[in-house]
Amino acid sequence: MWKLYNKQSPRKSSRPMHKIDGKIKIKRFLTSLLSGILIFLASWFYQNSSFTVVKEDTFFNFVNLFKYKLLNKILKSDPTKNKQFVFINTGKDLNLIDDTSGYGNIEVSDRYKILKLLQIIDNSKLKPQFVVLDLKFDYPYKYTADKAIQKKIRDSKLDIFLPDTIIDDSIQSEIKKSNNIAISVSLKAGKIDTPIYKARYGIVDYETYGSNLNKFRLHYNDINENSLPSLLNSKADGVVYSGSNYFTKCNGQLSFNYIWPEYYYDEETIKSNSKNQLYHIGSLLSIKNNTGLIQNIIKGKIIFIGNFDGDMHDIMYGTPFGKLPGTVILCDIYLSLLNGNQYVPKLWILYLIICFSLLSHRAIYKEWPNMVFNYKLKSKRFLLFINRFPFVKKAFDYYLRLMLVSYISILVFNINVSLAPAIIFIGLESMYEIWEQRKMKKLKNAQL
């Protein structure tokens, strides 16, 4: 167990002890304020990028774990604004086809069942609010991957009765009929990796720089496209996203372009929540006279069609809430947008500038604290080594204070604060203050 002591330094200050006049106070105030604004701007640009630091992820994971696992269970918090969702699982309905890249057989969803479901939706008088196809459509559909069987089917002239060559054209036709269907797509070399179907696309990028999914990008100004959650937010709720990567606007209000999403649902809660329904596509279509039933199920709801099977590792992503299917994460991000997590409160900006300014003033103009590490384990030598260097001890002191600033931001504003730029800036300021102390000490010794 280690203890950290932060007590008044017994040393005398290396700075000359005299009364500080008003001009110096104003100069120090303006310097600290300017430093606070610069740190905020650096944090803003860093916050609106895909980068994070591993230590940051560890801190945020710990805070979010406490938030989701403990507080949410105690408070039983549901999203303030919510929608009714229908989740349709295609996980067990997979078919093997030949990979044209030469990597053998790959799995694709049974598109014949997807076609049947889309036909029921398009022909229904009771329309859903929106349909999300969170599936990959990179390859043409094949009834079977076995070339010998394909040849026998063609030779027997039975291919006209099988949903093989015509199924992709039929799905494309059903997608064209509707204005409220979107397909998830990924990026390749900064451009959309276009699927075989022409449709409204929503970008889904789970790229992460830590062990878990952290920040998620909303708007792609460079290619004039939205992520799938912001596209859904736009089409279902009339929200307009505009601006650049670092100055994104949502309905004219300043917003983050990268957000840490709230995790309202997981694999279990999408089943237990009364607002949601989960079906397997095969079970749903196998019901006799299913048209009327499906129409009542989808009426006015948002439909997510995707793979929810937890044993499929390529569709599971690590989050502070544990590993979740990508489709469930997209739903959580959409709910985060619906509840306004992307908006930047003016009070939050003021809060950070004040905190960064105060810490800068402390770093530049205050004595470094006399902190002593006491550890009764094997790492004692390492901590004794740290005790010799005032900069390391001072940096640790400010790191703890910055974590407190971020923690308060999470609890009060529900916004994670990227710590890396602030740590670097205040660390440099601390180094300058220590260097100045030593310089003045040398001058004083030279005069004696």
Image (cartoon, grey):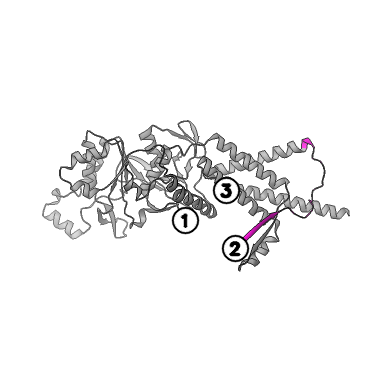
Would residue 52 appear left or right of 232 to someone viewing this image? right
Q: Earlier in the sequence, mark 2 or mark 3?
A: 2
User: Is residue 359 at all visible to an observer of this figure?
Assistant: yes
- Identify the residue position indicated by label 3 in the image: 419
Residue 6 vertical placement versus 30 (above, below): below
The label number, if any, that marks residue 1 in the structure image: 2
Q: Earlier in the sequence, mark 1 or mark 2?
A: 2
* Residue projecting furthest to the left: 156
Would residue 84 appear left or right of 407 to someone viewing this image? left
Residue at coordinates 29% horizontally, 51% vertically from top-left? 139
Helix, strand or loop at disc 3?
loop
Q: From the viewer's side, name the closer residue of 366 and 268.
A: 268
Look at the image and tell me in which quarter the N terminus lies: bottom right
| Rendering quarter of residue 370 | bottom right
Helix, strand or loop at disc 2?
loop
Q: Amino acid at mark 3?
A: Leu
The x and y percentages for residue 232 are 37, 38
Is mark 1 in CB contact (under 8 Å) with mark 2?
no
Q: Which residues are magenta?
A: 1-23
The x and y percentages for residue 123 are 21, 36
Q: Amino acid at mark 1?
A: Ser
- Identify the residue position indicated by label 1 in the image: 211
Helix, strand or loop at disc 1?
loop
